[in-house]
Image: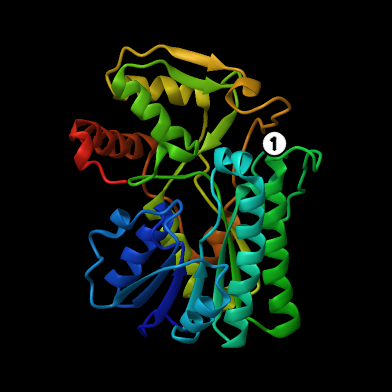
Amino acid sequence: MGSQQTLAYLVTGGSGFIGSHLVEALLARGDSVIVLDNLSTGRISNLKSVIRHPRLRFVQGSVLDELVVDELAHQCDVVIHLAGAVGVKLIIEHPLRSLTTNIRGSEIVIEAAHRYRRKFLMASTSEIYGKNSSGPLHEESERILGSPAVVRWAYSAAKAVDEILANAYHRERGLPTVVVRLFNTVGPRQSPAYGMVIPRLIRQALRGEPVTVFGDGRQTRCFAHVADVVGAILLVLDDDTAAGQTFNVGCSDEISIFDLASLIISRCVSQSPIRLIPYDQAYNSGFEDMERRVPDTRKLRSKTGWSPHRSLDEILDEMIAEAAAELARPPDLVTS
């Protein structure tokens, strides 16, 4: 499957933040797309620029619906599995629902891809590495997790099961699978609703509210623009030799969350103060976080030549403009 021929793609979670950008990119290059999304966290408005596209079909439904997934997998050439519970806040508030969606849902989608011998790409997460805060994390880095009693690690455990399942189908049954471990991905359409840090801080700064930083603010993260991440996904999808492999996808430029908050306040030209909120107030007692999360993307770069193009300043300016436009609209015009 080269990039020259046009293909039909099933994208689960295709009206979500990352999914909608991927759908746009696939359509732009001439492919056909079926989106399966239950709209629990995705929004149909995310697809407004392409919703009437002749090569797009939107199906509202769940990855837990085996008949629907089977039918749609049969109609496509490639299955991209992005659907799942996302965001630390959502995982902590609804752990059982999150586990069911992320484990059983993935199992159903992988089984359907195997049934019809479809190439399969699974979106995994940097949460896989757990509390491992050592320098840039490569694909073989150790997973360091807290107690199973700590809800925070349920997401990491679930996504690890998903990865193991995908790899087992590749090794034992020859299914062409690719796993991409996405580190912090940001950009237009990212909702602040699920604890995503940049959309939340931007809106606080624009409203002149205290900008809330959890913990001591010294924890560091790296932020990649969604368009750069989508570009990486397409590159590994189009490379048949990537089958059976896992790739970190993310930017390697590190910034502390306190410095991020300061930068956002500055670029918003805001007078907001920064307020530190202890983790046990922001989430619950016993919450655990990692001090650093930096990807080693050498494997992806050497395989595909990929590199991120957008700087953090460019990302913030784009997201600030979007949030400012949203806040300026009358409440009844703001899409859900």
Question: Looking at the image, is 138 positioned above or below residue 241?
Answer: above
- 29 displayed left or right of 73: left
What's the residue at 40%, 11% (across, down)?
273
172 and 102: which one is in front? Answer: 102
Left or right placement of residue 302 versus residue 144 in this view: left
- Residue 124 in the image: state x and y as whole percent: 60, 57
Residue displayed at 39% across by 23% down: 263
Provide residue 21's location: percent of width, then percent of height.
35, 58
Tell me, yes or no, if residue 243 can be seen here: no
Q: How is the image coloured?
A: rainbow
Considering depth in this image, is 98 or 177 the residue closer to the camera? Answer: 98
Residue 152 higher or lower than 73, as above or below: above
Residue located beneath label 1 in the image = 133
- In the image, is residue 139 above or below residue 259? below
Judge by depth and name the residue closer to the eye, 155 or 24: 155
- Residue 211 in the image: state x and y as whole percent: 43, 19
User: Is 311 on the left or on the right of 123, as rendered?
Assistant: left
Sort mark 1 into few (<14), some (14-19) or many (20+) by Cα contacts within 10 Å. some
Find residue 330 and report its horizontal and vertical position in percent: 18, 34
Q: Is residue 314 visible?
A: yes
Residue 102 placement: quadrant? bottom right
Query: Which amino acid type corresponds to the residue marked 1 in the rendered image?
Result: Ser
35 or 170: nearer the viewer: 35
